[in-house]
Image: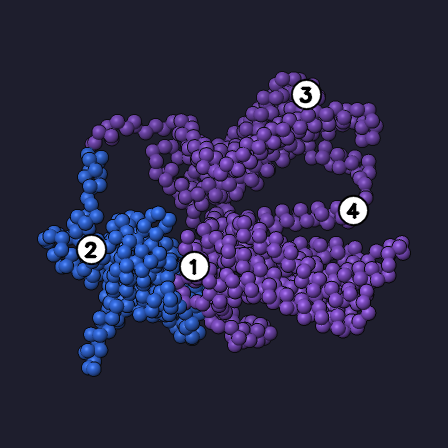
Chain colours: A blue, B purple
Amino acid sequence: MTVQQQANDHMNTPLIQTEHLVKKYGDKTAVNDVSIEVHSGEVFGFLGPNGAGKTTMIKMIVGLLQATSGRVSVAGFDVAAQPLQAKAASGYVPDTPNLYAKLTGRELLRFVGDLYGIDGEQAKRRGEELLRILDLTTAADDTIDSYSHGMQQKTSLAAALMHDPKVLVLDEPTVGLDPKSARLIKDILRQMADRGAAVFLSTHILEIAERMCDRIGIINKGELIAVGSMEELHASNQVSGGSLEDIFLSLTGGAEEAEITEILK
Amino acid sequence: MNAVASKVNPPSAAILPAVWKLLRLRWQIMVNNFRRSKLIAKIFTILAMLGLMVIVGLVFWFSWQMVRFIGTPEFIQTVGDPIALLDSVPALFFSMFFLGIIFTSFGVLLQALYLAGDMDFLLAAPIPIRSIFITKLLQAVLPNFGLSALFGLPVLYGLGMARGYNFLYYPVVLLLMVVLSLAAAGLAGVLVMLVVRVVPARRVVEVLGFVGAISTFICSQSGNFMNSNQGDATTTGNEVVGMLSFLTQLNNPWLPLTWPGRGAVALGENAWLPGIGLTLLSFGLAAGVFWISLQTAERWYYSGWAGMQVVAQKKKPARSARQTTALPMLAGLGTLMQRSLSAPVRGLMWKDSLMMRRDLRQLSQLITPLIFGVIYGIMFLGGGGDAPTGQGEAPEWFMESFTTLLSYGNIGLSVFVGWMLLGRLASMGFSAEGKSYWILKAAPIDPRRLLTAKFLVAYLPSLFISLVFLTVFSILQKVSIGPAVYSMFVLTLSLAGMAGILLTFGVLGANFHWDDPRRISGGKMGCLGTLIAVLYLPLAFVLFIGPQVLTMVIDFPIGYAYLAGGVLGTGFSIVCMLVPLRLVTPLVEHLDEA
């Protein structure tokens, strides 16, 4: 097998795979029969209105939530059957960075290093490198409760990157970040994908999805209603020349828009 | 402009209507909380209100009767003329009331101004800023004012009735309470801002919580200690006279805090000149303090002065420097742990120990068992810990068995200290992770390792502290080496079993959704865990110590008794430690998925 073939195989390996995934909370179905594949080297944007099931889906992928039915595999490991291997391969940045308030940024990274079984010296080096890249070095010895939201978000990303994961899952990663930090995070995600990782991110900022993501999935009321590259979405929705916003609104319903305009008249 | 905008009234600069609107909002929130509470909570609230009314009535009656009793010839003969004392009561009450309101409003205002999160919302609304501050002050003062009025007014009115004060006394007392409470709340607001200028608000809350919890515990336990030490000692007439004379001396005319009370009493006794003078002076001073405090607080808050810390936090030394100063013994322990425990387990233990040390609110819950241990240890040792000699009617074997059991009283007390610590560390080991639990859940940690880490975090410090207590008691009681070592063995294993049980129920009742560590509760599962631990302990003790007691009845060597007790007790403790944990291991994987 040639190096090129190996590279192609690598690019075609689905690092995240969900098959007929369903999550029910009592009678309410939060996620209904969602099947997605995210490949190595790909940035996948996951969009949907509020309460559509994005966070539930993400929590099932990273093993925080047990699926009612269906299957999730991460880096080839079944999240339900081989949770430790799947978790070891993935990094997760939640929408709200609830971190240990009384640890310092540096201590948190050391702790995460221990959790992922990274050798002490290597963890220290990696932690310092991430603190430097994310511009957190000066605050590294302050406890996290003194950090701003943006700093906590960046610390959360640093923690997710500590073990250099094959799969990175982010829930609204740029919310509350200044433009410089948002740009930094976007650059990091792109670099991660270029190095062969699969990046799965949910966002409400359609411009980010449009510019960053290789493929986009749109979920509405728990069901995956569209998936594909920008071109594929254009083609399947006959919104010629329209932006992702147009596609998104046409798929998820724009009735509310007219109502808002009426109220503001 | 749209149709709605044209119908909006122009903003008003009137303060009182805005204060009224904001108070109505508070009232609405309170009513909503009551409406949405469970039926049992509603019934409890209504019963509590009725109970409060009954207590207020009793206080009023008691005050009235008390003042009449103080005026009886018998009392005057024993203690002396009570007039000076009775006249001092309002002055002392108002002084305590003013200081009490400052103290209690401090915490409430700290929360309302800096942590409630509604200040920006309110400041952005088209209402006068002053109305927001007045509302915040009222919010801080009303509950404490209400309580003080409920218990204080019956006393003052009872006094007035018994002393036959004129009608002006009654409304003046109430009005004085109102203005004094406002002045005190204003001062508390300024104090809050001065403190927050130096220390972050959240840290102040933690320190207040810590100091409050520890002081309350020390006071309550010291009371028990004093009671047990005093025995049947009685207070003499001279002591009463001395105490009353001291209270009377506090009513010093040079102290401004006594002026409201002196003024009200003077008015009640128809001494118009000093009465009107002191009352007006008190009203004027209180209103002045309130006004100046309000304006200062407003200016400091709005200018941002009160939100900007001027004292920079001291940077901690770099980690490498700190590591080199570690004791060689601790370094040895570290190496041992490194060899025997996996990195995630070590990491979790290290993280939990840091978190416990740094969060003062959590720390207070760990310090209270130590205070408890010290106080009851002194009481236990003060009692001698010896078996009563009796009058010779009990059989000899019974007395010997009883003495043997008492000699293990040390273990009982040490286990109790350990139990209190485990109650916090093991029962709430998982819940303590709070909203950060996702970090552990998303990490590749085997549930068994997670349980091992949580077990060790709870067990090791509890064991260490209990062993220290046991060693100190054993030395002080001159326990011989054999029973002392056996006691340590019993303590080590019985605590292990208890840690297993409590941690198990901690998993079953884990609750990660809290904001204040003092609110972490074990819930029903925590109670059940405690109940089972209560059943476990005597059983374990019977197995460990029972064979020794049996040697008094059945003749067999004491060495065998130790061996039998050791084997039985160890087996039972280890089963109680491992089996419940084994049973809940599969549940750990799915915690926080509801």
Residue most toward the left?
A240
Marks 3 and 1, Cα distance to the nearest angstrom?
Answer: 66 Å
Q: Residue furthest front?
A: B554
Please tell me whether mark 4 or mark 1 is closer to you in this view. Answer: 1
Q: Label 3 amino acid?
A: Met
Asked if disc 4 and disc 1 are in contact, CB closer than 8 Å, the reply is no
Relative height, residue B297 to residue B460 (above, below): above
Contact? badges 3 and 4 (CB < 8 Å): no
Between A207 and B489, the residue placed more toward the observer is: B489
Q: Tell me residue A93's x, y (percent).
A: 34, 60
**Which residue occupies 22% across, 35% down?**
A263
Inspect the image, locate mark 1, and give the three-letter code of the amino acid beneath it.
Answer: His
Q: In the rendering, which numbered label is found on residue A111?
A: none
Position of B73 compared to B435: left or right? right
Chain letter of the residue carrying label 3: B
| Residues tagged by mark 4 and mark 1 found on one chain of the structure | yes
How crowded pointer 2 is (Cα within 10 Å; few <14, some 14-19, many 20+) is rated as: some
Q: Which residue is mark 4?
A: B230
Labels 3 and 4 in the same subunit: yes
Q: Which residue is mark 1?
A: B590
Helix, strand, or loop for circle 2? strand
In space, the residues marked 2 and 4 are separated at their CA atoms by 81 Å
At mark 1, the secondary structure is: loop
Residue holding disc 2: A226
Q: Amino acid at mark 4?
A: Gln
Query: Which of B384/A106 is in front?
Result: B384
